[in-house]
Amino acid sequence: MSARIGAGPLRRLVVLRHAKSAWPDGVADHERPLAPRGRRDAPVAGRRLAEADCLPDLALCSTAARARGTWELASAEWGTPPPVRHDPRLYAADVPELLEVVREVSSEVETLLLVGHNPGLEELVLELAGDGLDGTLDEVRTKFPTSAIAVLAWHGTTWRALAPGMALLTDVIVARGKKK
């Protein structure tokens, strides 16, 4: 199956799985912070997005502490971060819930960043990608680890038109920082 060619401007959905989180005793899952590795990896994710010319017009971010921390560290690497909306529906969301949030985005947004959690994000990428470049689909099927970025491209007049199999998975990046 291959991605369908649609009408309208090129749109990109950039999916960023939150960076590695810590598991402190007595802390609710929603409030888990980033682990030291996550604090190293998240800024690298921001730099890699800039290098790939994938800076978003808008970011949608889960309200979980680890997703918010990932967003804050990644976006701090850009001159002027775009607007961000922290949406509680993105925490522990499945594909239908994620698509609902994405489809609400204004048609003025051409590149959208989604910061959230697995397994929902991985499943969303696989659901939307009708095809992938250079083995990207196999890469996501094998593993979509923390700080992974997937870039989905498609043509459409509105985000509401985004449907399964419609996008092309153009890139998968796994951002890793170095220990000091």
Image (spheres, rainbow, N blue to C red):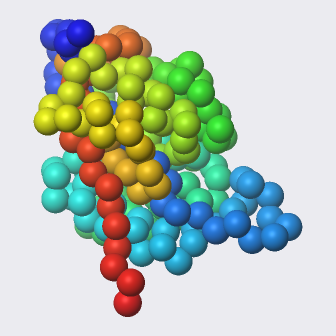
Q: In this view, does 89 lie to the left or right of 80?
A: right
Q: How many marks?
A: 0
Q: In this view, does 98 lie to the left or right of 160?
A: right
Instruction: Say which quarter of the image contains residue 136.
Output: top left
Give above or below for 163 relative to 64: above
Quarter of the image that includes the C terminus: bottom left
x then y, percent, for residue 75: 37, 62
Q: In this view, does 57 lie to the left or right of 89?
A: left
> What residue is rendered at 65% in x and 53% in y?
64
> What residue is rendered at 32% in x and 14% in y?
165
> What residue is rendered at 48% in x and 42% in y?
60
x then y, percent, for residue 25: 81, 70
On the question of residue 177 being in view, the answer is yes
On the question of residue 85 being in view, the answer is no
Quarter of the image that includes the N terminus: top left
x then y, percent, for residue 127: 41, 20
The residue closer to the viewer here, 10 or 153, is: 153
Q: In this view, does 39 lie to the left or right of 7?
A: right
Give above or below for 83 relative to 129: below
Instruction: Say which quarter of the image contains residue 103.
Output: top left
Instruction: Say which quarter of the image contains residue 5.
Output: top left
x then y, percent, for residue 176: 34, 67
> What residue is rendered at 54% in x and 41% in y?
118
Farthest-out residue, bottom: 180
